[in-house]
Amino acid sequence: MKSVIKKITCFMLTLIMLLSVAMPAFAKANVTPVILVHGLGANPVYTNVGTDSEAEIANLGLGDIAADIFQNKDLVNEVVKMMDPARKPNVNKLIGALSNIVGTDNDINCTVNGNIKKGQGVNNYWTTPLSQHKDYWQNADVAESAIARQLCKTVGAKNVYCFNYDWRQDVCLTAKQLNTFIKTVKKQTKAKKVSLIGCSLGGAVLSAYIDAYKNQKDVNRLVFANPAIGGVDVARAYALDLVINKKSVLAYLKCMETAFAGGSSQGLFKALSVLGDKRIGYAADYLGKFVKNKKNVTKLYMQVVKPWIGNIPSLWECVPYNSFDKAVSEMSKMGFLDKKSGLYKKIKKYHAVQGRFNKNIKAVKKQGVEVAIFASYGTMGIPVTSKVNNQTDALIDTKYASAGATVANYGKKLKASGKYVSRDKAINAKTCALPNNTWFLKDVQHMRFYYNSDATKLVANIACGKVKANITAVKKKYKKGQFLKEVNKKLKNV
């Protein structure tokens, strides 16, 4: 009898051990997987992918831009002339020099139909969690990889994925690839849903994704960090909204020197400021006249911009919704854009998606998806268009990133008041698509989310479900309101 009992006991113990080993393969996921979708330029792209001659394409095709500039005598000579009103730059030499620089190491542009060139793409399409790719995030300090690191710390690296894609391509195509990626992650983890966090251009990818696939109900949480969901006004350059003047340029340099205090870029802006009002002012005056001359602009666009980045769909898809028709009209008249091309079909399709964002985001929230939008402000616009006085995060205009906030011009204040108005009178969130799910981070410049900073922790905690994605819940748990200012990586209510 003892022998039988002993055998039965051994059998039961063995069975229990086997089941305990097998259970993870069949158990439901205890944690919702989080997928990070990066922005423009955050993921390297390559030519001759998968071959012995594989090589990274320099970001935006510029290579070692500083070296290229100083080695190009024609460009240096013409820039020096800009800073001296007694000398007149040679337009043809200037444009020719710029063309040579962007063409030196340039293989970044897409085909005339907006397709990635054959043999190009990414070499790090990971369908396994970031626990298998520690080199990407383990020592990351800032930007998308730092957010990935924070996510891994918050919910465990085995539950965090990074969706890497060729950021040049059509956003709607990327959304289709993301849909496939989500299915792969769900199958791998046995999870019913995933949480998505889109950074910068990644926000536009999420916009295209919910437009096409929201009825699949695959998403638990949807987080946007400095998203390009509404475009960026500097892209109004496609609509030939070109305005450059001394006052704006000097104000911008001062603004940037303060905005990037302590960062690697501060030295650059200080160096430019050292040149003084006169030299910078002379150059700004010259460029202001340059962009008012249609012949000059046409040469610049057709000989420099078009062969360099003119066929990249994602850049076109950053044009604000209300500027799109004007941009198409101006660029097609110039010969820059062919309305019969595949490129035009791609950007027109996303333009319609962009116009449906507010409707789509409300629809997914109604389905039960937790949504959070983080928009930054406190920096003026890039001084090349008439929108230089917009509040921005140093790149994306706050009104677009927030899906509709009413925003005071840089240095000005709103007259409005109420619970949705910031104490500094810069933002009225009442007009946002989701006013109760949108946060504003003052002085957090574009994608300057530092690891272990309050801002990055807040984004990660919401993405990982540590707190509900609404203003009330966050304020109750963390004492952080809707309007926050970053000081030494800490967030203070404003």
Image (cartoon, rainbow, N blue to C red):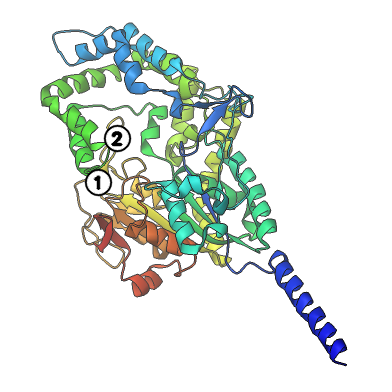
In the image, residue 59 lies at what x, y percent?
A: 44, 29
In the image, residue 248 lies at what x, y percent?
A: 20, 33
**N-terminal of the two: label 1 or label 2?**
2
In the image, residue 181 lies at what x, y percent?
A: 64, 49
Is 213 positioned to the left or the right of 154 in the image?
Answer: right
Up-down relation of residue 103 to residue 446 (above or below): above
Q: What's under tag 2, amino acid-wise?
A: Ile
Look at the numbered disc 2 and give the secondary structure of its residue.
loop
Tell me where residue 239 sits by quadrant: top left
User: What is the total number of numbered labels drawn onto the structure image?
Assistant: 2
Residue 268 visible, this orientation = yes
Residue 475 has which mark? none
Say which residue label 1 marks: 409
Q: Residue at the location (51% across, 25% down)?
A: 108
Up-down relation of residue 378 to residue 371 (above or below): above
Say which residue label 2 marks: 382
Q: Residue at the location (29% across, 15% down)?
A: 70
